[in-house]
């Protein structure tokens, strides 16, 4: 998807703007995403050079593994970002974008680790771990 997009955390202390292409939304069902968000995560991604973050002093980064870190607002707790330590892209939580977002769903990853209290009932591709095109931390 080509366009400029904006978004924020719940309290507005952290805002961001993206430009250029965003990846389709990927639903991650890994245990880390489930435990941090309370369910599965829906995220797109942008090149680092194509996102401007205002209020970076309000972002707390948590290194959930040696491979990646998760960024959230230190004031309201909104989960905003997931950042692989070795890549020049950043995942952005789909729900943090202002509307209309223009985003569309692409796939489900880590379905082998999904919660036992729900089913995946859409027709999107499902991957036991990740896809070859999405480099993530191994669970």
Image: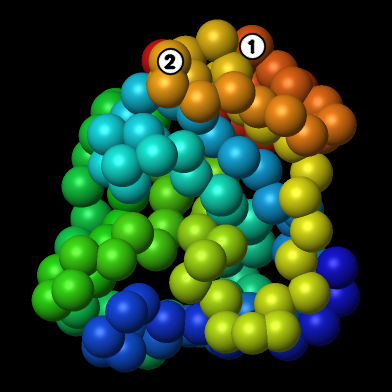
Q: Earlier in the sequence, mark 2 or mark 1?
A: 2
Is label 1 in a helix, a strand or a loop?
Answer: loop
Q: Is residue 69 visible?
A: no
Question: What's the residue at 32%, 79% (across, down)?
Answer: 10
Determine the residue located farthest toward the left in the rendered image.
75
Residue 114 in percent (x, y) is at 48, 20
The secondary element bearing badge 2 is classed as loop
In the rendered image, residue 11, in percent from the top left (x then y), is placed at 26, 85
Q: Quadrant of the C terminus?
A: top left
Q: Which residue is mark 2?
A: 116
Residue placed at 74% from the left, 22% from the top? Answer: 126
Residue appearing at x 42%, y 22% in the figure = 117
Characterize the local packing of mark 2: few (<14), some (14-19) or many (20 or more) Cα atoms within 10 angstroms.
few
Q: Which disc is residue 128 wearing?
A: 1
Q: Quadrant of residue 81?
A: bottom left
The answer to the question of whether label 2 and label 1 lie on touching residues, with beta carbons closer than 8 A, is no
The answer to which quarter of the image holds residue 55 is bottom left
Viewer-nearest of discs 2 and 1: 2
On screen, residue 40 versus residue 131, left or right, reads left
Percent of width and height locating residue 51: 57, 76
């Amino acid at each position: 998807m080509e366009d400029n997009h904006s978004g924020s955390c719940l309290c507005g202390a952290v805002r961001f703007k993206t430009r250029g292409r965003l990846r389709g939304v990927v639903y991650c069902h890994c245990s880390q995403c489930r435990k941090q968000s309370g369910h599965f995560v829906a995220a797109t991604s942008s090149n680092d050079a194509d996102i401007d973050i205002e209020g970076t002093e309000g972002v707390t980064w948590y290194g959930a593994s040696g491979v990646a870190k998760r960024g959230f607002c230190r004031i309201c707790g909104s989960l905003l970002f997931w950042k692989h330590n070795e890549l020049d892209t950043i995942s952005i939580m789909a729900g943090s974008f202002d509307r209309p977002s223009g985003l569309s769903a692409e796939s489900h990853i880590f379905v082998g680790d999904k919660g036992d209290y729900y089913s995946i009932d859409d027709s999107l591709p499902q991957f036991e771990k990740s896809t070859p095109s999405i480099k993530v931390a191994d669970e």
